[in-house]
């Protein structure tokens, strides 16, 4: 997974051709991976000042149990499908917040601890509501059709220009475009005249490798624009804002004339 994230960053930085942006992104990644170890080393001499075990520790055991359950579901998410996971996470966070913040009896004798966990539970409920609203808004974006070897042939036979996107769940620019570029009202209006095809290459498979080779894609995100005859008009690598995306779409549509 770390290798895929680094590859995605390399492709994004290469497309942007911005030295300082590349430096800041990889610096942030390095700090994120290294700082926890620095903090642990700094706190090593203060272990004797940590609170003693008690009822609060039983509650912490429940907390880590909920987190482990969430991680287990995260790793099987590709098997469950996007629609199921879109509904699962708000419900899971809300259920965990209610259980840990208000139902679990551990630590009720500790007044300050009880208040703290109720505040944390209330905050987690707010996060659950935000997740639910975000997933609803995301579902109103472009309705992509899965890309297959024959998908472009079908678009040509229908005399429709096509947009082909190669994306992955671990690709940060892909996620950003999902909530910005592909949710833009003007982009949504123009997309209705196109065959919108998407290849999800989150997982490495023989089918995905064949599609990457067929379309000459080296990294994600890569977006290819075709006219109605199946001729490639242009392609973009990396993040594309709504204005540039519409310009490329109109260019592909103009090539159909």
Image: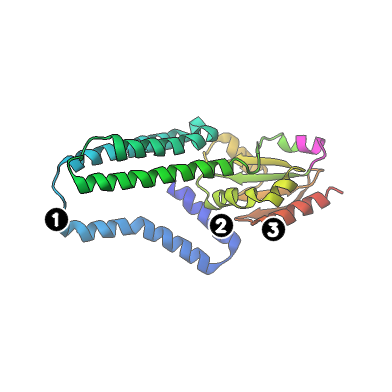
Task: Tell me which label, 1 or 2, sits earlier in the chain.
Answer: 2
Residue 101 vertical position relative to residue 31 in the rendered view, above or below? above
Q: How many other residues sit within 10 Å of disc 2, few (<14), some (14-19) or many (≥20)?
A: many
Q: Secondary structure at mark 2?
A: helix
Q: x, y (%) of residue 33?
A: 36, 55
- Between 143 and 186, the one lying in front of the other is 186
Task: Tell me which label, 3 or 1, sits earlier in the chain.
Answer: 1
Colouring: rainbow
Q: Residue at x 38, y 57 (%)?
A: 32
Q: Secondary structure at mark 3?
A: helix
- Between 127 and 159, the one lying in front of the other is 127
> Which residue corresponds to mark 1?
49
Q: Secondary structure at mark 1?
A: helix
Q: Which residues are magenta?
A: 154-160
> Which residue corresponds to mark 3?
243
Q: Residue at x 37, y 60 (%)?
A: 31
Say if residue 219 shows up in the picture. Answer: no
Q: x, y (%) of residue 200?
A: 58, 40
**C-alpha separation, residue under disc 3 versus residue under disc 1:** 56 Å
Q: Residue at x 51, y 56 (%)?
A: 9
Q: x, y (%) of residue 182?
A: 64, 48
Residue 223 painted magenta: no
| 173 relative to 49 in the view: left or right | right
| 5 relative to 137 in the view: left or right | left
Q: Depth-wise, is mark 1 or mark 2 nearer the camera?
A: 1
């Amino acid at each position: 997974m770390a290798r895929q994230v680094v590859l995605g960053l390399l492709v994004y930085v290469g497309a942007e051709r911005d030295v300082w942006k590349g430096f800041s992104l990889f610096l942030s990644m390095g700090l994120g991976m290294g700082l926890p170890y620095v903090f642990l080393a700094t706190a090593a001499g203060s272990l004797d000042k940590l609170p003693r075990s008690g009822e609060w520790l039983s509650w912490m055991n429940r907390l880590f149990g909920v987190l482990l359950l969430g991680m287990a579901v995260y790793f099987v998410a590709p098997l469950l499908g996007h629609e199921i996971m879109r509904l699962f996470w708000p419900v899971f966070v809300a259920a965990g917040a209610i259980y840990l913040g208000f139902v679990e009896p551990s630590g009720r004798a500790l007044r300050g601890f009880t208040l703290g966990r109720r505040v944390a539970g209330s905050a987690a409920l707010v996060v659950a509501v935000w997740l639910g609203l975000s997933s609803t808004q995301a579902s109103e974006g472009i309705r992509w059709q899965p890309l297959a070897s024959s998908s472009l042939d079908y678009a040509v036979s229908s005399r429709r220009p096509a947009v082909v996107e190669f994306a992955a769940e671990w690709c940060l620019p892909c996620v950003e475009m999902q909530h910005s570029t592909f949710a833009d009202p003007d982009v949504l209006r123009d997309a209705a005249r196109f065959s919108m095809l998407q290849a999800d290459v989150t997982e490495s498979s023989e089918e995905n490798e064949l599609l990457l080779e067929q379309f000459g894609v080296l990294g994600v995100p890569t977006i290819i624009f075709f006219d109605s005859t199946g001729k490639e008009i242009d392609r973009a690598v990396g993040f594309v804002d709504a204005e540039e995306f519409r310009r490329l779409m109109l260019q592909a549509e103009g090539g159909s004339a």
